[in-house]
Image: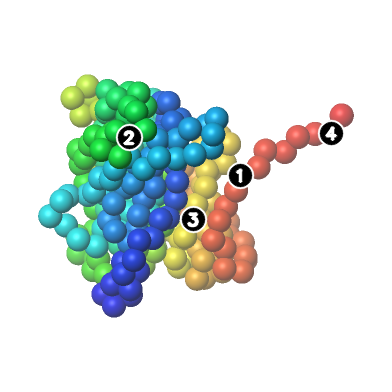
Amino acid sequence: DHSAQKERQADPHSHAVVLDSHFSRIAYVPDLGMDLIRQFRYDPVEGKMLAAGTMRSGPTDRKALGPRYIEFHPTLPVAYVINELSSEVSVFDFDRLAAEQLLGASAEDVASAAPTLRLRQTIRTIPDAFPGDLNTCGRITVHTAGNFVLVSNRGHDSITVFRVNQSLLKAGQLYIVGSFHTRGATPRHFQFDASGQWLISANQDSDRIAVFRFNLATGRLEWTGHEYSVPSPNFVCNVLTHSED
């Protein structure tokens, strides 16, 4: 609700730190409290980060965005930010030239560096008819094949699948495939198996994990009918097993 949202944005609230996928030298920190993505120059030798400016996590005329996490596309120079409070995904172009200038700047000039992410698209994760104040977004991930982006909706209790546009002029932009019920309440997290064909949803408030089949061609999720009792699940980790010789 609005009071809870106001409380969560009363102060800065850094929610993650993610390195760029091209140089692994620029760190991005979504600040849920301030509606910002903070960028830093990361020194892997010294283990230090220098503040290098900020950028909005969505349109400049909007409030209560609540950026939670950022994911990079595996092959395209594109990043996806999940805005938890506004139930939206923002699509950013990664500016390689600006990134190179940031990495080559003197320590004194880093703070005034140009943004390395440029907003191109913002798209809603829940149907327009569903009240936005009854939903917050959880996880975002880019499928390893690079063709789909998936987001969990806590409140709408769904996973929304977007197809990634691969055309030259719109590469990286998203259009919706559909929203699929998670067969439980509050999908805080979800995870693919190693093949990318099976998805497990952690439905935190119904004490269940549910297993879905993912169609690699269409992006649609199909419930398998398999679910398991797990007290308040909030994370799923895929581990490959190895036989002992």
Q: Earlier in the sequence, mark 1 or mark 2?
A: 2
Q: Quadrant of the N terminus?
A: bottom left
Q: Residue at x 52, y 70 (%)?
A: 206
Q: Nearer the viewer, residue 20 or 110?
A: 110
Identify the amino acid type marked 4. Glu
Where is residue 102, by image quadrant?
top left
In the picture of the structure, the residue carrying the numbered disc 4 is 244
Among numbered discs 2 and 4, the one appearing first in the sequence: 2
Q: Which residue is at a point 57% across and 68% down the rendered structure image?
A: 232
Q: Secondary structure at mark 4?
A: loop
Residue 243: give x, y in percent of width and height. 80, 34
User: Residue 85: where, in percent of width, then height?
Assistant: 30, 62
**Alpha carbons under labels 2 and 4: distance apart:** 53 Å
Q: Nearer the viewer, mark 3 or mark 2?
A: 2
Q: CA distance from mark 1 to mark 4?
A: 19 Å
In front of the other: 88 or 61: 61
Q: Which residue occupies the foreground of this view, 211 or 135?
A: 135
Q: Which mark is residue 238?
A: 1
Task: Indicate which label's residue lies in the foreground, 1 or 2.
Answer: 2
Amino acid of disc 2 = Glu
Q: State how far apart marks 1 and 2 are (Cα).
A: 43 Å
Sequence-first disc among 1 and 4: 1
How is the protein colored in the picture?
Answer: rainbow
**Disc 2, SS:** loop
* Callout 3 secondary element: strand
Q: Residue furthest front?
A: 108
Q: Residue furthest bottom?
A: 3
Q: Which numbered disc flags the more N-terminal residue, 3 or 1?
A: 3
Label 3, on which residue? 189
Q: Residue 188: horizontal and vertical position, in percent?
A: 47, 60
| Residue under numbered circle 2 | 108
Q: CA distance from mark 3 to mark 2?
A: 40 Å
